[in-house]
Structures are given as C-alpha cells and as structure tokens.
C-alpha cells in the first residue's frame, strides 16, 4: 500500500530530510522558495491573528514555526511520527507569539470538526496519494466557508521531468544507481540520490485548477517554483552554469510557467455554500 510505504520512507529519512532541505546552505533551495511563496500567500490573505491555520504535511515544522511568529493558533499534521518528533523538538525552546499543536494524522481522515479552520496549507502531500477524491472532500469539510486553501503539486509538463521515467528505471539498477550517486555526491557535492520505494504522481496545473473548481474551490493566485530549462540530470550536471538563470526565473513564478517550473502552488478560496 502506497500510504504505508510513504510513511515508512519518511520515518527512515526524517533527520536527513530536515538536514538536507532546512539546515544545509544551498544556493538554490527549491523548498525554501516554496516556503516563501506559501507564507506570502497566507500573509496577504489572512489578516486576523486569531485565525486557525492547519499545515498538512508539516514535515519538520518550519512552516508552523514561521506562522506561529505571526498567528496565534497553528496546527501541524504529518503522516510520519519521526517528522512530528523533529518538529516538536524544534519548537520546544522557541518564544513564539502563537501556539502550535502537532499531530500524526492522515489527510484523508482528519480528527477535526467541520468548518474548523480559516486556512489550510497542503504541501508535498497529494502526489503520494492514490487519488484526489478523498482528500479534497476532507479538506472541504474542515475548512470554513470562504476559507483559504493553499496546495502544491508536481507539474507534469515541466521540462525537467521529461527524462524521469527512464531515469527511475535506471535507478533500479544497482550499478547505475551507485554511479549516479557517486557523481552527485562526490563530484557535484550535492545531497545523495533519492530512490523512492514508490512513484509520486504529477498533475497538469490547468486540470488541477479545474478539479479544484469542480469541488468548490475558486482559484485566487498561483506560483511556480524550482525552475529548469533542461531535463534531469542535465540541469543538475550543468548547475554551475545554469544556477543564476534558474534563480532569476523565480521572478516570473506568478506567470504561466508550466514548462519551466517543476512545482505548482495554487491558492484558492472555498466557495460559500
């Protein structure tokens, strides 16, 4: 079952994930760009400091901590017990404006009352689920009318992803995987190569917007992030040349960048019943 594989994987790599994406310095950190766009969306739309905000897939808690510096009532949910452990540990000695309530949970079956939240963030989650029907019903249930939903998906049309089916096949060959990993770690001096025990889904941004509208969410704004003009691993091998360009492309993240942005974030508002 994919859900259990995802949970096991992130329990195993939780410390490494936190170090890789939130502790180490990186000249072009895609998750930090994603974080910035989501936080800016929330800040522009939510002015009431007393509102309740839920971060589903909160991981090691970075978004919850930032939100709790500005808002009073923050909730973080993740399927991984180890991610929640790290998030709680990070929060222990911080002097924050608001409170953070962390919980291990499943996006398709959450322990909250109907119309409980003013805003929901769902980042790096839906690509690991079997379908989109269950989670969208659950988020609609717990979000207030006219509440904000911010959600991101992997963009199926991104040029970077053109070669991934072949590369996923090659990474299952031990010799090829070790070679790729050696190049990435020892030569390029980047984090080790990932080999997921599952295949994450991707989405068409346009079709995803349509799906959200059909399920009661009206699009307000979007950002693309993690830009590239070449397929993987060419973009990684040439990163020393392409890095300045990739960073500059982030200036155009609010435009229609479906061929260049690997990630797609959409902010929408629940339509009043």
Image (spheres, rainbow, N blue to C red):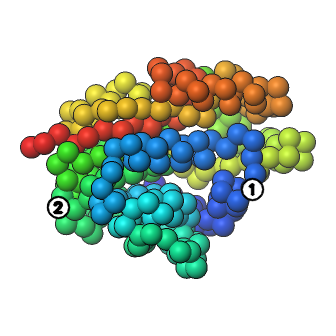
How packed mark 1 is, by other alpha carbons closer than 10 Å (few <14, some 14-19, many 20 or more), is: few
For this rendering, which residue is in front, 174 or 203? 203
Q: Under tag 1, what secondary structure?
A: loop
Dividing the picture into quadrants, the one containing residue 52 is: bottom left
Sequence-wise, the earlier of marks 2 and 1 is: 1
Q: Is residue 261 above or below residue 113?
A: above
Residue 4 visible here: no
Left or right: where 78 falls relative to 246: left
Q: Under tag 2, what secondary structure?
A: loop
Whole-percent x, y for residue 84 in the image = 51, 71
Q: Which quadrant is the C terminus positioned in?
A: top left
**Going 25% across and 34% down the picture, which residue do you hit?**
218
**Going 39% across and 51% down the picture, which residue do you hit?**
121
- Which residue matches tag 2? 114
Whole-percent x, y for residue 126 in the image = 41, 47
Left or right: where 152 falls relative to 259: left
Residue lying farthest to the right in this orientation = 187
Q: Which quadrant is the N terminus positioned in?
A: bottom left
**Going 64% across and 61% down the picture, which residue do you hit?**
18
Whole-percent x, y for residue 226 in the image = 61, 34
Dividing the picture into quadrants, the one containing residue 51 is: bottom left
Residue 107's mark?
Answer: none
Residue 240 visible here: yes
How packed mark 2 is, by other alpha carbons closer than 10 Å (few <14, some 14-19, many 20 or more), is: few
């Amino acid at each position: 079952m994919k859900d259990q594989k995802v949970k096991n994987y992130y329990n195993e790599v939780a410390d490494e994930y936190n170090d890789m994406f939130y502790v180490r310095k990186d000249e072009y950190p895609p998750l930090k760009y994603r974080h910035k766009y989501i936080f800016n969306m929330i800040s522009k739309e939510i002015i009431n400091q007393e509102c309740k905000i839920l971060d589903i897939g909160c991981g090691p808690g970075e978004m919850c901590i930032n939100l709790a510096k500005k808002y009073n009532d923050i909730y973080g949910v993740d399927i991984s017990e180890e991610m929640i452990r790290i998030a709680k540990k990070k929060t222990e000695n911080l002097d924050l404006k608001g409170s953070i309530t962390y919980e291990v949970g499943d996006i398709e079956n959450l322990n909250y009352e109907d119309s409980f939240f003013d805003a929901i963030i769902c980042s790096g989650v839906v690509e690991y689920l079997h379908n989109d029907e269950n989670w969208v019903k659950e988020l609609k249930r717990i979000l207030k009318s006219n509440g904000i939903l911010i959600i991101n998906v992997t963009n199926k049309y991104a040029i970077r992803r053109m070669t991934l089916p072949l590369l996923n096949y090659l990474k299952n060959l031990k010799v090829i995987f070790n070679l790729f990993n050696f190049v990435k770690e020892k030569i390029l001096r980047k984090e080790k190569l990932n080999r997921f025990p599952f295949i994450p889904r991707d989405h068409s941004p346009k079709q995803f917007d349509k799906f959200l509208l059909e399920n009661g969410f009206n699009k307000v704004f979007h950002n693309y992030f993690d830009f590239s003009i070449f397929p993987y691993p060419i973009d990684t091998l040439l990163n020393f040349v392409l890095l300045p360009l990739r960073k500059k492309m982030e200036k155009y993240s609010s435009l229609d960048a479906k061929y260049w942005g690997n990630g797609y974030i959409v902010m929408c508002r629940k339509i009043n019943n």
